[in-house]
Amino acid sequence: MTVADQLKQEGASGMLVKMINRRFGKVSPMLKQKLINSDLDLLDQFGESIFDFENLEDAEAWWKMKTPRKG
């Protein structure tokens, strides 16, 4: 990942955290980590889906569906 890509990722994840905070209140630690550690493509998909969420649990469920557990 280039420095430019890293800066874009950090900006996108930061903006999404702010959007979730504003819409639903405090972001859960799990959701915040998912946002911080995800690539731009996944952040873009999440950003489009944010309008469909009715609550914080919907946002968390989206991540669980997109990133299944390994094992």
Image (cartoon, rainbow, N blue to C red):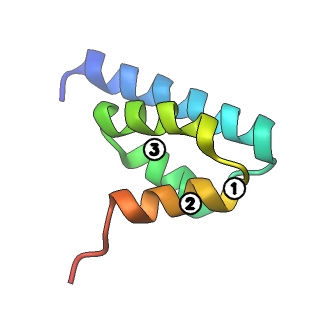
Observer able to see residue 44: yes
The amino acid pointed to by label 3 is Ile
Image height check: is 25 above or below 6?
A: below
Residue under numbered circle 2 = 60
Which quadrant of the figure has residue 21? top right
Tell me if label 1 and label 3 are in contact, CB under 8 Å.
no
Q: Quadrant of the N terminus?
A: top left
Residues 17 and 6: in front is: 17
Q: Quadrant of the C terminus?
A: bottom left
Residue with the most extreme bottom position: 71
* Mark 3 vs mark 2, CA separation in Å: 14 Å
Counting from the top left corner in percent of width and height, residue 25 is at: 81, 48
Observer able to see residue 28: no
Res. 37 mark: none
Residue under numbered circle 3 = 36
Res. 56 mark: 1
